[in-house]
Image: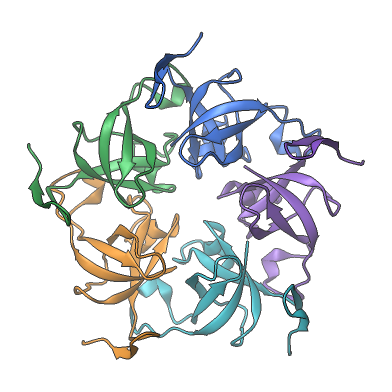
Chain colours: A cyan, B orange, C green, D purple, E blue
């Protein structure tokens, strides 16, 4: 799983039916700084550090094996020690 | 999921039967600028910014678990704030 | 899916039974120039530009869900406009 | 499978139900030095060199086909010859 | 599939039960020179050039859909023309 930070919500009104109304978030990978879109079944806020699962596991993590996700948030990290900035507790 | 921009249609007359007559689009990834081919069940125009799902989820997103896709468009982004150019609403 | 060019046939006499006698081709990815091995159920010639599917979709595209492929050719591109060289129609 | 070294435990209290209470570890890939999060069904210590499976195989390796993992530790390497430092036996 | 060269056997006594006693090999990818661990159902020797399948196909190629592999050797290449060194037949 990847460690990512939530940036913002992505609005895509025109979408396939299987996506439903689940919230899609733009996230930035900690390692590569590259941005991807993740499905959020947990309920994250902007700035949260999260764990995201990819591959086929992203489908059932999003709630059903038919859900068309390849990147789903599975947990919010309690605190994250960023080497350059010291320990940072997440506001709850 | 990846954020990509649609470039053009790709014509491949000689293809395996399972591909059917679905439209194949050349898309360019926002992060890496690399080009891939995506299946389009949504109905995109050239220049649209889209969300594309990969991995095994690309199969059911294309309409059936037997569809041979590893990259399927699942939604069109309403607007996309390109940092270098400001907010850009998509023409509908 | 990826856009690749067929280079040559790869001979591997000692192989697992599930591979059968299907032809394996060395292909070069257009984007990265990296070489991989693809299963060819279409019937390609050296030099053809092809569309190749990866992930789990490569299995059924090769003919059966038990076929051990992660990279299967699904179509031959009719023509390919290489930016540096202009439009190039493929000889049929 | 990848060769990684275990760095530390990752605490994520707010998580989806399917993750259960399995321990999540931050691991560093030997080849790229990039960090990922792995599920640990083996029982590793910090510093252990481990073999980690990705893709859909990470699900059943974590104990069930519904487990939402894309990176699961499957074994601890007995000893690892690091070219720059000579053979290093792992303390058991 | 990837083209790799076999380097050596990897010993991991402490492992999950599903791995069984199958031999695990350290292999080096031809394209990137990066090392990974592959399951060997074919019977390779050090130095062999092999074809390795990844993704979900690596499971059934290793002998069963429950086998936790994401990188399984499926064939030994008869000869490999390394551009820098000319044709090299593999010793059988």
Q: Is residue E30 above or below residue C18?
A: below
Q: Position of residue C61 (x, y in %)?
A: 33, 42
In the image: residue E54, left or right of residue A75:
left
Residue at the image point whose x is 40% and y is 85% from the top? B83
Q: Position of residue D8 (x, y in %)?
A: 81, 61
Q: Which one is in front, E49 or A8?
A: E49
Residue at the image point whose x is 32% and y is 52% from the top? C31
Q: Which one is in front, A56 or E80?
A: E80
Q: Is residue C45 above or below residue A55?
A: above
Residue extending furthest toward the top: E92
In the image: residue C35, left or right of residue C43:
right
In the image: residue D31, left or right of residue C20:
right
Quarter of the figure that contains the C terminus of chain C: top left
Q: Position of residue B8 (x, y in %)?
A: 18, 65
Q: Which one is in front, E49 or C67?
A: E49
Q: Position of residue A88 (x, y in %)?
A: 76, 82
- Let me know if residue E31 appears in the view: yes
Asked where in the image residue A51 lies, by quadrant, the reply is: bottom right
Q: Which one is in front, B5 or C23?
A: B5
- Let me know if residue D64 appears in the view: no
Residue at the image point whose x is 22% and y is 35% from the top? C42
């Amino acid at each position: 799983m990847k460690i990512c930070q939530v940036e913002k919500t992505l609005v895509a009104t025109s979408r396939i039916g299987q996506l439903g109304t689940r919230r899609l978030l733009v996230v930035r990978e900690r390692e590569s700084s590259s941005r991807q879109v993740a499905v959020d079944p947990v309920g994250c806020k902007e700035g949260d550090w999260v764990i995201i699962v990819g591959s086929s596991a992203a489908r059932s993590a999003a709630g059903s094996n038919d859900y068309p996700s390849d990147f789903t948030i599975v947990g919010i990290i309690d605190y994250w020690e960023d080497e350059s900035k010291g320990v940072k507790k997440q506001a709850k």
